[in-house]
Image: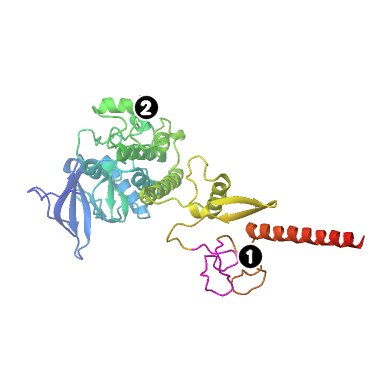
Amino acid sequence: MAMMRLRREDPRVVGSFRLHRRLGAGGMGVVYLGSDRRGQRVALKVIRPDLAEDQEFRSRFAREVSAARRIRGGCTARLVAADLEAERPWFATQYVPGPSLHDKIAEEGPLPAADVAAIGAALSEGLVAVHEAGVVHRDLKPSNILLSPKGPRIIDFGIAWATGASTLTHVGTAVGSPGFLAPEQVRGAAVTPATDVFALGATLAYAAMGDSPFGHGSSEVMLYRVVHEEPQLQGVPDALAPLVRACLAKEPEERPSTLQLSLRLKEIAAREAQGLGMVAPLAEARPVVPRPDRAERLERADRATGGRRAGHPPPRPTERYTERTTQGRAQRTPAPRPRGAQPVPSRGGGARGRRHPSQPGVRPGPRTGPRRTGTGTGPGTSSGLRRPANPRLLRQRLFVFVVVTLIVLLGIAGAQALQG
């Protein structure tokens, strides 16, 4: 909140408080920064001398101070002291450090949806406490909302001190500002808690767009738009637009209650905050690792089709197999490995790489095919497995068998001939 030096006509002491700076001035009085003897800082409001002589205004001022005493909770600036019988009535509230919502938007621009929803949820919850105390604010707007480190705070209950030609501050008129006044206030009808809901909807739209949903213009033009035209919400995020539009309904009974508004805005704030927290991890490039079952299925498909599936390269040489058929039995032998490649472990747990002829259990010879082994567990054998026979060795044995059989048959035939 901007501070200004005290002027010559400003008092230096009010009640038990010493005044240090001006915090603001409006049509009803001046707000000062003061402190008590213990050093506690307060925002002290002193009424203008001409309004202090109006008994109707004094009565209304006394009702506002009484209402501020009844409000409980941390949504408002706590009332510290007041003097309604002084020559110039005044009251002091707890000083809230931090800029107003209006100043923050003017300096930094519109807020993201998560921040708007979080501020709206806190303000809605605060209005629940205000309305339970039997109070209607009647002038909720961005300049009457302070963004303290502990959360937003609502100030100026019925006392408009912000400068500006559009502020309605005359005694006997509705307190408020064009663009944030509800239609029933413009028509002079009775105000209700729904009146503050309308003002809160306009405030949230302002925080999201950086502008009033009813545009700019003279007080008469803006009041006409509030009553007869629909708000312009093109800049409000989609997550908030339906709820803000419901708050700005022309009829009070069509607006949500403050409790409903608080619950709904909390849900939106949580969802938007969760969505923003997930943007950073998803933005990082991370490889997509397929599940083991999917990888196995892809490998089987590659082996079955020889790597000819669309969009997939053929398998590596170590995974390519050739089919050989000998005596009706299909044998699958792995293709030669590239130079320097490691041997592929066998299913039985032993090494199936090529052994040197000097190793035990391996007979030397020029043969390059698979060696025939038994089912034992000695050197050169695999536990519980039988290797396929060598086709060359089978042909040799078959030839020997046929030759021996022919010789035996010829011998038998010759012996019978000699006997005859």
- Image x and y of residue 305, in percent: 56, 44
For residue 327, side relative to residue 220 (left or right): right
For the point 54% across and 67% down, the residue is: 351
Quadrant occupied by the C terminus:
bottom right
Type of colouring: rainbow
User: Disc 1 on helix, strand or loop?
Assistant: loop
On the question of residue 110 being in view, the answer is: yes
User: Disc 2 on helix, strand or loop?
Assistant: loop
Q: What residue is pinned by disc 2?
A: 230
Number of numbered discs: 2
Disc sitting over residue 319 in the figure: none
- Image x and y of residue 15, in percent: 19, 57
- Image x and y of residue 400, in percent: 71, 61
On the question of residue 129 being in view, the answer is: no
> In terms of secondary structure, what is the magenta stretch mainly?
loop
Tell me the amino acid under the disc marked 2.
Answer: Glu
Tell me the amino acid under the disc marked 1.
Answer: Arg
Frontmost residue, 268 versus 276: 276
Q: Residues within 10 Å of mark 1 (few under 14, many from 20)?
A: some
Frontmost residue, 70 versus 98: 98
Tell me whether the residue at label 1 lies in contact with that at label 2, contact meaning CB atoms closer than 8 angstroms.
no
For the point 74% across and 59% down, the residue is: 403
For the point 49% across and 51% down, the residue is: 290
For residue 219, side relative to residue 370 (left or right): left
| Image: 53 above or below 402 | above
What range of the chain is rendered magenta?
A: 343-367
For residue 250, side relative to residue 77 (left or right): right
Disc sitting over residue 372 in the figure: 1
For residue 118, side relative to residue 289 (left or right): left
